[in-house]
Image (cartoon, rainbow, N blue to C red):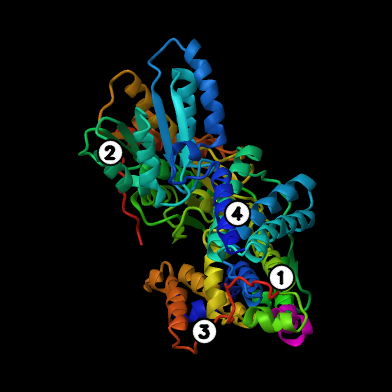
Amino acid sequence: MDLATIFLSPTLWAMTLSLGTPIALAALGGTFSERSGVVNIAMEGIMLTAAFFAVFFSSLTGNAWLGLLLAVACGLGMGLLMAWAAVHLRADQIVIGTAVNMIAAGLTAYLLHIFFGQGSPSNTPQLPVVTIPGLAQLPFVGDVIGHQNVMVYITIGLFILAHYVLFHTVFGLRLRSAGENPQATESAGLSVYRLRYLGVLIGAFLSALGGAYLSIGVLNSFTQNMTSGRGYIALAAMIFGKWTPWGAFGAAMLFGWASALGYMFQGTSVPYQLVLILPYVLTVVALVGLVGRSRPPAADGIPYVHAR
Amino acid sequence: MRGMRYWAAFGLAAGLAVGLVGCGGSSGANNTNTPTGGNTAQQASGATQTAPSGKAIKVGLVSDVAGIDDKSFNQSAAEGVRRAAKELGVQQQIVVSQRPEDYVNNLSNLAQAGYDLVIAVGFNMEDAAKQVAQQYPKTDFLIIDSSVGDISNLAAATFKAEQAGYLVGALAGLVEKDKALPNMNDQNVVGVVGGQEIPPVDDYIAGFQQGIQKTDPGAKVLVRYAGKFDDPTTGNQLGELEISQGADILFPVAGNTGNGAIQAAQSHRLYAIGVDSDQSYVAPGTVITSALKRVDVAVYDTVKAVQQGNFKGGVQTFDLTNDGVGMAPVMQGIPQKDVDQVNQLKQQIISGQIHISTTVQE
């Protein structure tokens, strides 16, 4: 296959969407959490937890949607633990995030072994792949976005919603104020604690969707550490996307695209390893400010103490 | 109030230590004990009383990051240890590594704790095993999938995986040429999903290519690497990609990553070939056979040798002649004549008529 064929092949772009989706969801989750002022490096752990429970409940109830719902509930539980430690107890947020990631890795491996010693059941129900009538018939575009897992469409919808909520609603303004200047937020009569809890929980909700997408969207099984670092890549996508929903989406898709391209390049003369490092190079470039400075919310990571 | 945050961090850290069951940490082998390790260890001590044979030696196994439920070589190694516990009455401990950085720690923890034999599963632990074996010269070590020959207390089990790859490749070629199974296309393409470009993976792939070449010279073999062994999502995408390019039989050689490729084949009602252990149960009706690497045999034999005082360091080769590699029983629907032909090829390999190279063709 020559280069032009690869770039023009709908497979490349369909794969980009599919590989970018879980990263995008987690990056959006991180964006909400950090916009409210809580540094969130726990996306990996929350994704992994949700990935396990999605398979667990999906196979238990025989319904992938119930599996998704209950997996999200477990992700929220993890988020609640994190919010309590970060907001109420004012613990170091990096330490909490690391703790959540390690708990998730140990817990899911342990539960996998207890409940599914032989691996998760091969008849676990899966979220459906949807064909959009009309769209799917279009040349090229149809092959790229006409026929994807339902979670891909949900993700796109969530991004539109997230952008609107964060930048065009009162709630969004308040959430952002808690991350920029919590003293001002509180003097306006708002509860910084409440806003930060909400930020972390929305973040956990989105990361959990990303994890469930991996285990019952793309696949219908859970294996140890199956998120394979996507939560950390989402962290990079969040930063590269300058803490905005569409920025995070674009960055996540760029990462997905680079992976897809790397896989497509195998077997050609292009050294695919070079393509695979592209996203990381771009993240570093973004961080040192070559493509416009990437600046976190001003009060991000600083525990807030009630003014009395 | 300021002290609260330190307490919260401390509390979470403590919770973490408790929650880390089954997780390979650096805080000692006891924390890293998997539940089955614990359970079967109890069974094993029961067996000690009844088992007539052997000294009660202690055997520790450290898995790589794919974990012992990988339906592949880690699992096979763990089975070898469990069988040894049951039949030889040895005490066992299984440690699952969470990160490559833990390999050295997990191995030295077991050596430090007085284990007689410490087993490192997988080529990626080679450096860690070499380092720890030299630090603990009185402990015996076994490394799977390696050919380190120069350390006297380190045995290296090396498998002629290219022979197993050749057999399943020959079968895939026969099935592909005759379109012997439903849903197969006319394109004569098969796909390989590799974990990393490392010798234990490439041996299989090289053998597979030559096997197909033998029985279906016109076939095209797509080869792609995921770059990791613990990522079934990527395995699935690579499988889908190869299927979109006409592959109707996939051969994943990639641990947990490969299970994603098997699922891709399953969702298209196409076919896959398992690797390392008999993976037919992963996707019945999809997995037509598996290329076997009897890691369990290597582990069991080494435990036995240690127990009897016959442990030898250096390279131990497992191949078709000692049933260290092979091909699993085939799925129903595969023509018997194909199986017969593969068996003939097997005899020719054993007798030396067929030589198999370990170089993957571009």
Residue A85 rendering spot, x and y as whole percentages: 64, 60
Q: Earlier in the sequence, mark 2 or mark 4?
A: 2
Discs 1 and 2 share one subunit: no
Residue A173 covered by magenta stretch: yes
Answer left or right for B51 relative to A13. left
How many residues crowd around disc 3 within 10 Å: few (fewer than 14), some, or many (20 or more)? some
Please report the bounds of the magenta region as a residue range: A161-176
| Image depth: mark 3 or mark 2 in front | 3
- State which chain disc 2 sits on: B
Q: Is residue B357 above or below residue A208?
A: above
Q: Nearer the viewer, mark 3 or mark 1?
A: 1
Which of the labelled discs sits on residue B133, or is there none?
2
Q: What secondary structure predominates along the stretch shown in magenta? A: helix
Q: Position of residue B254 (x, y in %)?
A: 47, 51
Q: Are marks 1 and 2 in contact (CB under 8 Å)?
A: no
Residue under pointer 3? A294
- Residue at image point 50% right, 39% down: B31
Of residues A102 and A149, which is closer to you in this image? A102
Q: Label 1: which residue?
A: A193
Asked if both marks, 4 and 3, belong to the same chain, the answer given is: no
How many residues crowd mark 4 within 10 Å: few (<14), some (14–19), many (20+)?
A: many
Q: Label 1 sits on what residue type?
A: Tyr
> Residue A7: within the magenta?
no
Read off the residue under disc 4: B265
- Which is closer to the viewer, label 1 or label 4? 1
Quick one: quadrant of the C terminus of chain B?
Answer: bottom left
Question: Where in the figure is residue B264, as x and y percent of width and height?
Answer: 60, 56
Which residue extends farthest left?
Answer: B150
Q: Is residue B300 left or right of residue A10?
A: left
